[in-house]
Image (spheres, rainbow, N blue to C red):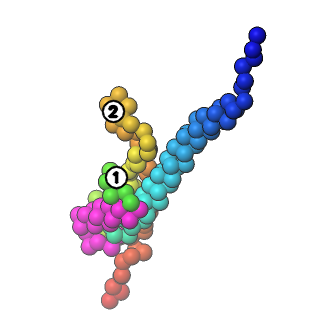
Amino acid sequence: MRSRDDRGSAIVELVWLGILLLVPLLWIVLSVSQVQQGAFGVSAAARAAGRAYALAPDDATGQRAAEEVARRALADQGLEDAPLRVTVTCTPYPRSCHSGTSVITVRISSSVELPLLPDVLGGGRPRFALDAIHTVPIGRYQEIDRG
């Protein structure tokens, strides 16, 4: 009876094992990079939106300015198409953020798509949610006329 020669099969098994381990590792690295890029963008957007809102003359103008600079901050990080929600709250004067000694809190909500994953069951590409909060005391960016 002749024995089968197995020389050369170890290299094939090693290549397949390497591919099976490399693909998930590559996906993890790309996903972490995408999420980190989004985290930087959302953090910068919250900071810029808080400043823009505080510098605006009134609440309506502040809301528009905050949304505009938040969108620009996300675009600077390469996230032009990312969804964006800007929420502004104020204490202790919730109806007028630009009065007295208000403290403005800006919350930016967004998300990034995870790379290399197809639509699963038609629900859209998987996304990773990102939030950032920035608080600005209104007096920090206002000039007070002392008469």
Image quarter in which the C terminus is found: bottom left
Residue that protrudes farthest toward the front in the picture: 1
Q: Which residue is mark 1?
A: 82
Does residue 55 show up magenta in the picture? yes
- Distance in Å between CA atoms under marks 2 and 1: 17 Å
The residue tagged with tag 2: helix, strand or loop? loop
Q: Which residue is mark 2?
A: 123
The image shows residue 137, relative to residue 7, as above or below, that is below
The image shows residue 36, relative to residue 98, as above or below, that is above
The residue tagged with tag 1: helix, strand or loop? loop
**Front position in the image: 69 or 107:** 69
Q: Position of residue 29 (x, y in %)?
A: 55, 48
Kindly report the secondary structure that dominates the magenta region of the rendered protein: helix
The residue positioned 39% from the left and 76% from the top of the image is 141
Check disc 1: other Cα within 10 Å, few if <14, some if 14-19, many if 20+. Answer: some
The image shows residue 142, relative to residue 90, as above or below, that is below
Residue that protrudes farthest toward the top in the picture: 1
Q: Kindly tell me whether residue 92 is visible in this rendering.
A: no
Q: Which mark is residue 46?
A: none
Amino acid type of the residue that numbered disc 1 sits on in the rendered structure: Ala
Check disc 2: other Cα within 10 Å, few if <14, some if 14-19, many if 20+. Answer: few
Mark 2 or mark 1: whose residue is earlier in sequence: 1
**Front position in the image: 98 or 118:** 118
The residue positioned 40% from the left and 48% from the top of the image is 112
Q: Position of residue 33 (x, y in %)?
A: 51, 53
Image quarter in which the N terminus is found: top right
The residue positioned 50% from the left and 47% from the top of the image is 31
Residue range highlighted in magenta: 54-77
Q: Kindly tell me whether residue 147 is visible in this rendering.
A: yes
The residue positioned 60% from the left and 34% from the top of the image is 16
Q: Position of residue 124 (x, y in %)?
A: 33, 37
Q: Position of residue 44 (x, y in %)?
A: 43, 64
